[in-house]
Amino acid sequence: MRNLNLALALLAGLFFLSPPAGAVLVSMDGDEVIDGIAFDDREIISLDSSPGSAELWLGWDDGFLHEDLDALTFLPSGNLLLSVSGATVIGGLIVEDGDLLEVDLEAGTASVFLPESTLGRLDVDAAHLLPEGHILLSFHRDELINGLPVRDGDVIDYDMEDDSFSILLSEDVFAVDSDVNGVALLANGNLAVTTDDDTMIGGVPLEDSEIAEVDLETGVVRIFLSFEPRVGQADVDAIAILRPACDDGFDNDGDGWTDYSPEFGVGDPGCVVPAAASESPECQDGIDNQGDGTVDYD
């Protein structure tokens, strides 16, 4: 494992590494060995399609979190949003399995971002934050939301401000009744999903340790990431796909401008290229602005 880089996080009971460019973050539903490295069902793993690429991205001290992760996504600030498989205590905070929690990775604190009571005490099984107050969600069981049926294989687009939702992906795309375990929206607008059982989606076989990419306009499906030969029996239980700050759809630095744009004055002035990892101009100006001996974002 690479050098741990945040003393504050270590003191708070967390330890994590710098986000890897182009890698997928996953958590499994059981203890697992991937590429010869042992992980438990709480930890977040960074990997790509290359054998041997798996490494620990985020680990937890037993005193901070001791439940299986069910859902995983990020806020524009870089704070983590997650849901766990059962009622528990996280960082001293009493939580339910339907709570969506915000974890400040640097401070090592947890708070409730979206309480379970908002959606009728539903167990959140997958989540992905969208801009403008929307969030993609899938649930552990078939449920009713505001009197309307939602199945465990549906992915909904929930508007947190209006308390309304629409079905973004229907369970009908699966050949058998399948529970969506993880969801993420890709930069190209396609949806990445993983399920709790081997299934068929859009005519494409999907193993429970594979991630499918679904074109929401055409219905075309392909395997986005397969690491089936590299794991044992555990399923992928949560996924997150990190995008650079200048290409993630969010105003990360809160200056009223969003992302890179080739047209002057339209995008964030701090985004000189779409791959930039920070929207702050000071993070890309080649100057040690704080006088701390470091220059720009690494």
Image (cartoon, helix red, strand yellow):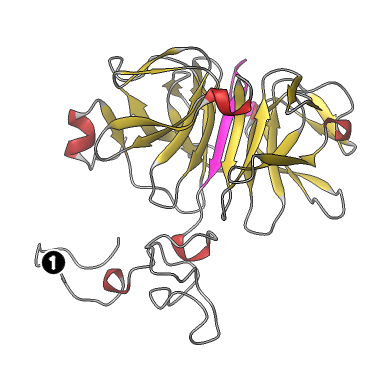
Q: Is residue 238 magenta?
A: yes
Measured as percent of width and height from the top left, residue 93 is found at 34, 20
Looking at this rendering, what residue extends furthest in the bottom direction? 264
For the N terminus, give its image quadrant.
Answer: top left
Residue 7: quarter of image: top left
Residue 236: quarter of image: top right
- Helix, strand or loop under label 1: loop
Looking at this rendering, what residue extends furthest in the top direction? 87
Crowding around mark 1 (Cα neighbors within 10 Å: few <14, some 14 to 19, many 20+) is few
Q: Is residue 35 left or right of residue 178?
A: left
In the rendered image, the vertical position of residue 207 relative to residue 173, given as above or below: above
> Pointer 1: what residue?
290
Q: Residue at x 41, y 60 (%)?
A: 252
Where are the magenta residues, as a range? 229-241
Pick the residue in front: 267 or 145: 145
Pick the residue in front: 242 or 138: 138
- Residue type at numbered disc 1: Gln
Q: Is residue 29 magenta?
A: no
Measured as percent of width and height from the top left, residue 96 is found at 49, 17
In the rendered image, the vertical position of residue 169 relative to residue 122, given as above or below: below
Q: Residue at x 88, y 39 (%)?
A: 202
